[in-house]
Amino acid sequence: MQTIANQFGIHKALKVLGVNSINEGTSTGSQKFSNGDLIDSFSPVDGQLIGQVKATTKADFDVVMEKATSAFKTWRTLPAPQRGEIVRQFGDKLREKKEALGKLVSYEMGKSYQEGLGEVQEMIDICDFAVGLSRQLHGLTMHSERPGHRMYEQYHPLGVVGIISAFNFPVAVWAWNTALAWICGDVCIWKPSEKTPLCGIACQNIAAEVFAENNLPEGISSLINGDYKVGEFMTKDTRIPLISATGSTRMGKIVAQEVAGRLGKSLLELGGNNAIIVTPDADIKMTVIGAVFGAVGTCGQRCTSTRRLIIHESVYDTVKTAIVDAYKQLRIGNPLDENNHVGPLIDTDAVNMYKNALDKVVEAGGKIIVAGAVLEGEGYESGCYVKPAIAEGKPDFEIIQHETFAPVLYLLKYSGGVENAIEIQNQVAQGLSSAIMTNNLREAEHFLSVQGSDCGIANVNIGTSGAEIGGAFGGEKDTGGGRESGSDAWKVYMRRQTNTINYTTELPLAQGIKFDL
Ligand code: NAD
């Protein structure tokens, strides 16, 4: 029988990416080594073992730290535009391997092939952005209050940046961090999710090729692998001034405290509980497309997935009927097959969390209007395929206040003005992405005003899901407050220095203070 891996060219993709059946999970570039236990990577698509990765031990990590610290001394002295040239070459290599990497992302993580390709495209886009930025790491010039003095600010690299990433964006989040950190003059150590270790191996191989081709030292890009204990090697290490961590709020709170305890910096990209407000003036067709893609895309496993629809009572029934109808057309199955809309959840633990959320909403007095189910039979052997579900409930139900990383959409009703909908939206602990569907300018502007959405991302007439790399990405409150990717997010990866230069023969003190000797 033809397996999915054969049918969809997975073996060929693994070969192109240099991913083997057993892989060294620790690497400083072309050098690879590992002394830890094996981590299995099973595909949620068909439940098959794709490959294994040897975890990083503390001794392995110490070698990585040594190489990274030493590489920083070389890398930081390369002019930023030359570092940009390396990132340009890295972007080109990603273009060459886009199909293979997109396929691995889809097979190892379970998102659709189109979304896998989209993730690699985001990597390419951030490289292009970083190349331009490498000539624009500008500081300010100020007027000194002292005669014959000049004052300005400049940015220097931080050193070794530690990156911890989540399973759901197994390649793009690393690139968002590294492309910027590299042009800033930092070197990076990455610990990918233990649920998607092969994506980490593939990316590191691509980066290592570029650094080797340019005769650059080991340690500018390093990879470590393992669970939270390996993550802790980095969060506890005072030689790492910045930890960029993407994942659950639970993880973020632990990492934040650990890093703050040693006065390091952390950049946190944590969970969301994103809502779309649907006002009486919404375009219903656009609303349905935005809400359905937002709720079921990546099987509800995006940090920006739509979890709550806050619908005005006057259009509630119309919107509800249209969305329930749209759900009837969803095709669930192998995400490499482009005819399907919804792939699997990452693993059976996630399936249990999905089932638990549906039980909890009913216990709280909610009503399931599109029933969930765990799918069985041919094509669903991994046990990770579920039916996207919809429930009606009240905004303050405990389960609705939480992020369930699965395709469960809650419909909530509001009456009165848009301010009531905004209050419901802002009532949750998370503050990542938000949206309003309206053709009413006053409502849209109110939503974007100081009394409006409290999220890091607030959209008008598009959904909550996804973002472009040009804008700063991140959220407030329990989402962690970090900003990655575009805009001036690069400043997080650098330290600011204020310089005052006296070009006179006098030494006047600031604020007119006299100190005569
Ligand atoms: P997770 O928190 O379980 O794991 C994320 C990463 O943190 C993994 O690499 C894990 O090994 C590591 N980790 C866990 N505990 C740690 C500790 N104590 N010290 C150091 N490292 C530790 O998250 P997940 O299940 O992989 O991903 C899903 C979550 O990520 C969701 O909550 C989602 O919203 C969030 N997410 C947020 C963003 C964003 O940009 N805001 C993007 C993607 C995912």
Image (spheres, grey):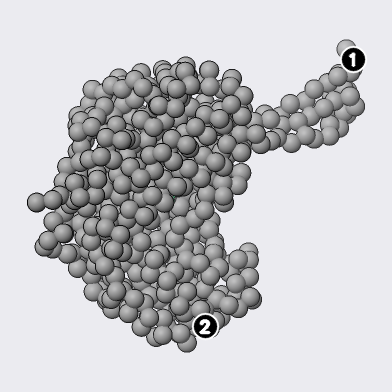
Residue underneath mark 2: 280
The vertical placement of 7 against 53, above or below, is below
Label 1 beta carbon within 8 A of ligand 1: no
Camera-side mark, 1 or 2: 2
Q: Residue furthest top?
A: 517
The vertical placement of 138 against 401, above or below, is above
Of residues 152 and 145, the one nearer the viewer is 152
Residue displayed at 34% across by 69% down = 409
Q: Residue furthest left?
A: 1
Quarter the C terminus occupies:
top right
The vertical placement of 359 against 253, above or below, is below
Query: In the image, residue 411 lies at what x, y percent?
Result: 38, 75
Residue 338: image quadrant is bottom left
Circle 2: residue type: Pro
Residue 155 in the figure: left or right of residue 159: right
Residue displayed at 38% across by 24% down = 29
Circle 1: residue type: Thr
Residue displayed at 39% across by 43% down = 98
Query: In the image, residue 53 lies at what x, y percent?
Result: 24, 32
Label 2: state its secondary structure: loop
The vertical placement of 488 against 479, above or below, is above
Query: In the image, residue 123 lies at what x, y percent?
Result: 46, 43
Label 2 beta carbon within 8 A of ligand 1: no
- Determine crowd level at label 1: few under 14, some 14-19, many 20+ residues with C-alpha closer than 10 A: few
Query: In the image, residue 45 lies at what x, y percent?
Result: 22, 52
Label 1: state its secondary structure: loop
Residue 254 seen anywhere in this rendered image of the structure: no
Residue underneath mark 1: 505
Residue 232 in the figure: left or right of residue 506: left
Say whether disc 1 or disc 2 marks the residue closer to the N-terminus.
2
Residue displayed at 87% across by 28% down = 146
